[in-house]
Amino acid sequence: SSLCDGPLTVLHRITPAITMGYGIFDIFEATTKSLSKDFLLHGIATFGVMAYFCENDIPEIVLPFLLMEISTVHLVFMKSTYLSEKSVAANMGLFVLTFFFYRLMICPYLWWGIIKTLFFEEVDDAAISCLPPNFKYFWLLFGIIFNGLNGYWGVKIILKVLRKINGKEKMKERILY
C-alpha cells in the first residue's frame, strides 16, 4: 500500500473540498456576526489545511481526520435551549465520547502511522512520489498543532464534566472554562 494510491471513491476526493467550503462559511460567519476569534481561527485553519491537501491532489490522506467533526454535531446541540435536562446530559455524554474517541484516540493513532512511515521506515520512492517535498514536515506540524489543541480542549472538557458531576455547575449552564 502506498500514500499515493489515490482516492478510493469520488467521496474521498470531494469531501475535503466540501470541508473547505465549511471553513469559508466559518470565516464569513466570524467576520459578519462578530463571533469569537476562536471561530475565525477555526475557519482559517480548516480552510488552509483542506486547501493544502486539495491543491496537492492528495485529499484522501486528510479524509480520515474529518472523523473528528463527528463530535461537532453534539457540540452544536449544546447551544440549543429547548432540550430537557436529560437530553442535554445525553447529548453532552455523546459529545464527550465522540470527542475522546475520535480526537484523542483514533486520529492521533492514524497521524502517528503516517509519521512512522515518513520518518522511521524505509519507503520506496514510488510510494510517496505524489507527495510535495514539504509534506512530511507539514504533516508533523499539522499533527502537533491539532493533537495539541485537542488535548487542550480534552482537559477543559474533563474539568467541565467534573463540575457538572459534582454539582458546581448546572447541566444547562454554559461555562466554557
Image (cartoon, rainbow, N blue to C red):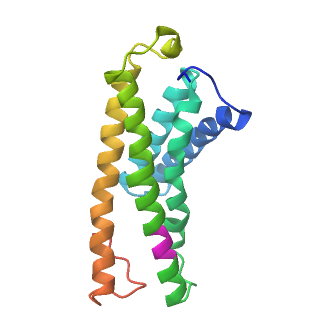
- Residue 26 pos. (x, y %): 51, 49
Q: Quadrant of the N terminus?
A: top right
Vertically, is 92 above or below 69? below
- Residue 22 pos. (x, y %): 57, 46
On screen, residue 124 versus residue 141, left or right, reads: right
**Magenta segment: does it hold 93?**
yes
Q: Is residue 39 visible?
A: no
Vertically, is 16 above or below 168? above
Q: Quadrant of the C terminus?
A: bottom left
Front-most of residues 72 and 136: 136
Vertically, is 20 above or below 77? above
Vertically, is 134 above or below 78? above
Task: State the extent of the magenta-drawn residues as a range.
Answer: 91-95
What's the magenta bit mostly, secondary-structure-wise? helix
Counting the numbered discs, the total is 0
- Residue 99 pos. (x, y %): 44, 61
**Magenta segment: does it hold 50?**
no
Q: Is residue 42 visible?
A: yes
- Residue 157 pos. (x, y %): 33, 68
Residue at position x 54%, y 21% in the image: 2
Residue 143: quarter of image: top left
